Image (spheres, rainbow, N blue to C red):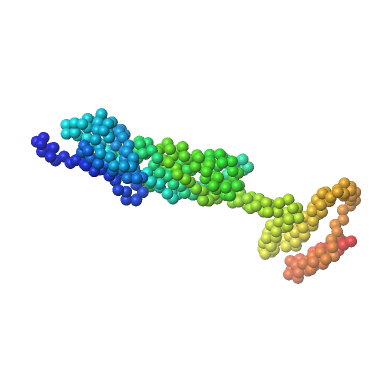
Amino acid sequence: MALMDFIKKQFIDIIQWTETGDGTLAWRFPMAEMEIQNGASLTVRESQVAVFVNEGKVADVFGPGMYKLTTQTLPVLTYLKNWDKLFESPFKSDVYFFSTRQQVDQKWGTPQPITIRDKDFGAVRLRAFGNYSFRIGDAKLFHTEISGTRDIYSVADLDGQLRGLVLQNISNAIASSGVPFLDLAANQIQFAQALAAQLVPEFEKIGIKLENITVQNVSLPEELQKILDQKIGMGMVGNDMGKFMQYQTAQAIPKFAEGAANGGGIAGDAMGLGAGVALGQVLAQNLAQGLSPNAAAAAAATTTAASQPAVAVVSPADVMTTLEKLGELKTKGILTQEEFDAKKADLLKKLV
């Protein structure tokens, strides 16, 4: 009976793994009802690592190469299982292969806006996405912490865990980068470097090596995007007050046109726009006077003028233009004859 049992034994003499390219990270060599023959061949290809597990413990790790499995190549297993007494105490062990090649173009992103701290705005909400690549750096640690005794462990099985680590460390990465929130979109490389610095030690805790990570887009909240647009506009005009007034006027014209299209308060808007332009001219003149050598004299003249009743001065051309516009409003029925006459009288009083 013992002889028949011995004959039925199946001995493994070649142990190897040919990857299929389906994103498998860990693969368990099939060992059911089979035993490893003393002197068997173990082939570990480039971008692979083989791990021997005996009685639930990792016994040895093999890098790329071809090995003859003897008591010399597996001294630890010889001690545990008496491999030198092959048939009296046959050697059976679990063999796991791990792919160490780089897993590229892995996606990460914020499914929902995340709240971060910013020195300028306090708490703000952010969306961002990009990609990253990784590889198994420590097969033994990855086996004990992640893949365990599963027959197959794939990239898809690990995806959620790694995405979670990325999202968990975004806030710390932004804080450590020193990049103001409004400048994040223009400093994506620096942001990615700070994020990588945060993630490398977190990935290493589970046997993963982060190769690189990129930030492809940072989406700002709508209200902060408007502030960023204004900042860009002011950066273009610099300290030139004349250009600043032109910029402000250009920003106001679309709103004025929108109000005119809706038929609401046209006359008032027209007068308001004219007053705004006049105010801008006065401010520009005052600034120019303040920067001139005769600033003191100009200031004195201004003080004297301020003690006298203010009289608004309007050029005849401006009066005629405004009267023509008011006439068109009266013709369209927007202004009554009485309102037109009152506006006309006010404008004529301003002529000097």
The residue at 59%/43% (across/down) is 179
The residue at 57%/49% (across/down) is 185
- The N terminus is located in which quarter? top left
How many numbered marks have been drawn onto this rendered protein structure? 0
Q: Quadrant of residue 16?
A: top left
Give the x, y percent position of residue 19: 32, 48
Furthest residue in direction bottom, as rendered: 331
Furthest residue in direction top, as rendered: 79
Asked whether, in this view, residue 336 is left or right of residue 129, the answer is right
Asked whether, in this view, residue 166 is left or right of residue 79, the answer is right
Give the x, y percent position of residue 131: 47, 49
The residue at 44%/39% (across/down) is 203
The correct choice, above or below, for 194 with respect to 344 in the image is above
336 and 304: which one is in front? 304
177 and 82: which one is in front? 82
Q: Quadrant of residue 141?
A: top left
Give the x, y percent position of residue 166: 47, 43
The residue at 14%/40% (across/down) is 8
284 and 338: which one is in front? 284
One can see residue 103 in this view: yes
The correct choice, above or below, for 150 with respect to 221 in the image is above
Give the x, y percent position of residue 321: 80, 66
- The C terminus is located in which quarter? bottom right
One can see residue 307 in this view: no
Asked whether, in this view, residue 24 is left or right of residue 93, the answer is right
The correct choice, above or below, for 47 with respect to 269 in the image is above
Furthest residue in direction left, as rendered: 1
